[in-house]
Amino acid sequence: MKESIFLRRVQSITHVAMALALGVMALAVFVNVVLRYGFGSGVAASEELSRLLFVWMVFMGAAVAYPAGEHMAFTSLAGALQKRPKIFSALTTVIRLLVIAACAMLAWGAWQQVVVGFGSHSVVLGYSTALLPLPAFLCAVAMGVMALIELVRGTPLDLGHSAEVE
């Protein structure tokens, strides 16, 4: 019970952070467009700020989408095997292990980029360029931990993805 309250709070905070990031991005880009086309000048920092906020927003959204089961999934095989519990359970385990492996590879690569970024700074705003790959690392760690928890608990695979194929 406490876990679900904790997860809901984290999701709420993340949704607010994503909304704020989107709002700041939209405002920065709008002001820059008006300044460029209306007055022949612009704010150089708006491009860097928008890029940084977009990267963070995307990875925050990816991390929040995982426990909600909102990532794209190909559930045809799993759906067909759902009536065979032993095979379905084994497939669920394999899927969780593949998710953990993919998250580990993403985290490793992103961390290498974070380390490289410690030595340089963005041109206009001067922030450490380690802030660009950092959300990918954090997202991969969060999703990997969530998949590991699902694997340990034996959480059944969510087959709620029902999209029509044309």
Image: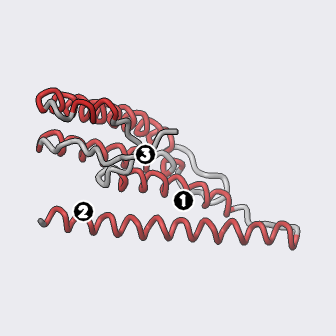
Q: Nearer the viewer, residue 36 or 81?
A: 81
Count of numbered marks: 3
Q: In this view, does 57 lie above or below 43?
A: above
Report crowding for label 3: few under 14, some 14 to 19, many 20 or more residues within 10 A (C-alpha): few
Between circles 2 and 3, the one closer to the viewer is 3
Q: Residue at 31% across / 48% down in the picture?
A: 160
Residue hosting label 3? 163
Identify the amino acid type marked 2: Leu
Residue 124 image-quadrant placement:
bottom right
Q: Which residue is drawn at 83% across and 67% down?
A: 41
- Residue kind at label 1, given as amino acid type: Leu
Q: Which of the 4 image quadrants contains residue 85?
A: top left
Q: Nearer the viewer, mark 2 or mark 1?
A: 2
* Neighbour tally class for label 2: few under 14, some 14-19, many 20 plus, Cα within 10 Å: few
Distance from disc 2 to disc 1, alpha carbons, whole Å, reads 23 Å
Q: Are marks 3 and 1 in contact (CB under 8 Å)?
A: no
Q: Which residue is drawn at 24% across and 35% down?
A: 96
CA–CA distance between discs 2 and 3?
Answer: 26 Å
Disc 3 versus disc 1: distance between alpha carbons? 30 Å
Label 3 vs 1, first from the N-terminus? 1
Q: Is residue 60 left or right of residue 86?
A: right
Corner quadrant of residue 73: top left
* Residue displayed at 64% across by 71% down: 27
* Left or right position of 87 against 77: left
The image's mark for residue 53 is: 1
User: Circle 2 sits on which residue?
Assistant: 7
Front-most of 106 and 15?
A: 15
